[in-house]
Amino acid sequence: MDFDYAHLALMEEREEEEEEVSSSRKAYRKQLAETMGLNRTRILAFTNKPPSTSSLHHQHQHQHQPPRRIPQRPERTLDAPGLVDDFYLNVLDWSSANVLAVALANSVCLWDASTASVTTLVTYGEDQGPVTSLNWAHDGINLGVGLNNGQVHIWDCVTKTLLRTLQGFHHTRVGSLAWNTHILTTGGMDGRIFNNDVRFMSYPVSTYKGHTQEVCGLKWSASGQQLASGGNDRLVHIWDRSTCTQWLHRLRGHTSAVKALAWCPFQSDLLASGGGAEDRKIKFWNTRTGACLNSLDTASQVSSLLWSNNQRELLCSHGSQLTLWKYPSMVKMAELSGHTSRVLSMAQSPDGCTVVSAAGDENLCFWNVFGLPHTTAKKTVPKAAHEPFSHVPRIRVKAPIPARLVCKRGFHYRTCKTGTWQATSNRGCDARSSSVIGSDVVLLPQNYIGIGGSGRKQTTDVARVIFREKHKVGEPSETTVTNEPDGKSEYAHSQDQHGAGVHG
């Protein structure tokens, strides 16, 4: 109810004016009444629902949020002598362990962003090099290295040891690599794509045939179910992991080589692709339907695309600069200049905020383009010490567990003394143990393989259980549960008094 208007309508004396009023005056009064809302005849009137308090608070925060400052110049520049100026190669990648790998001619160098230290992982000979592609596995330890002679090497970058050599299926240079858990996908100059299961010493588990020229871009989706590939034949293919006979979609529209590929982090079926020097366009695809959603001309060769993890933004390297776009409006937010030659590749830091770009001027430029790392109000929990079999599911013991020790010959076990757990020999023993309250129990798979006294492998239907006392400081104890043929189970546990082991 409008109380102001009700008061006006009740108290105002409605007297007809005696004097004549001109038509222009009447029109003016009518327009003024409509504007001021005084031409109503009803006191009660329906109005829109007032906005909620939460929406007003959100609008207030949004209006007063300061704009993010995007530096126009790199915050750090590193020399990269020997960087090959080739658009089709992928010679830069940043691991989840915060280590940057870069290929410099025949060498692979590692730059630790935490300590700013540089080490050389390997230097190849002229018969193998130069290095044509690099890609880190998700664990941040293993690095895939593609070579000019068609070989692919897998390195352990912690121990600096060569773990595997994949050869015999690519006969020309391998210009693109992409990890998907234990699958390493390789794309070569011959136009073929292979999926290699690195757990087995065998040939590729599947092959994708669709490109007729060099494969210069490979990207797995975040779910690991779809693979996007771009080639010098101006095509983009979408492959499904479950089927390897035919592509899911063949995307046409680019008029030059497609190297830049990026899956959207906030929309799983959205893919961005960038064309080469004759195309110069960024295209957005719906990978469910294969439809092109939008296209943007950048006026120069697109070499790399990166999505922001926190904002709806897309970073593009084209020509000798980097451009940040707002999605989906594609409004230009910033232009970053620092290179004097064309940008060849980009990589994103583990926190998603810093981007490094490599260019033909043999420089690596680091840009703080995506703001500060996303922080939460939760307390940071320090990492616990590594425990054996920490990846195995645990159960919680709520009651005391009396156990009789039965340790089979040939299996390691540990004995207990007051507050401390220590290892003993492999001899069998039988003793009574004290109760264990509030311990973590780890159940390992059965058919445990041990080494017998004769040195031969013995397979026994055994499940090992590890107890860890919460109220005592020391190493975890071990208990072995042996499933007897008659269906009975006996717990294995040992107790040591004053440091002396119990042996049978």
Image (tube, rainbow, N blue to C red):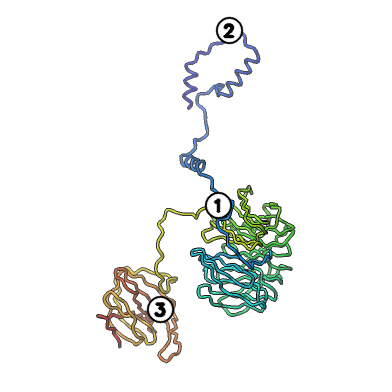
- Label 3 – label 2 distance at C-alpha: 108 Å
Q: For the residues carrying marks 3 and 1, which lies nearer the camera in this image?
A: 1
Q: In this view, does 131 lie to the left or right of 383?
A: right
> Which residue matches tag 3?
463
Extreme-left residue of the structure: 498
- Label 3 – label 1 distance at C-alpha: 48 Å
- Label 1 – label 2 distance at C-alpha: 68 Å
Q: Which amino acid does label 3 sit on?
A: Ala
The numbered mark, 1 or 2, whose residue comes first in the sequence reads 2
The tag on residue 18 is 2
Q: Which amino acid does label 2 sit on?
A: Glu
Q: Which residue is drawn at 52% across and 61% down?
A: 350
Say few, some or many: other residues with alpha carbon within 10 Å of mark 3 (under 14 / 14 to 19 / 20 or more).
Answer: some
Q: In this view, does 476 lie to the left or right of 375?
A: left
Q: Which amino acid does label 1 sit on?
A: Gln
The tag on residue 311 is 1
- From the top left corner, tell me how far across and down residue 123 is, in percent: 60, 75
For numbered disc 2, what is the local secondary structure?
loop
The numbered mark, 3 or 1, whose residue comes first in the sequence reads 1
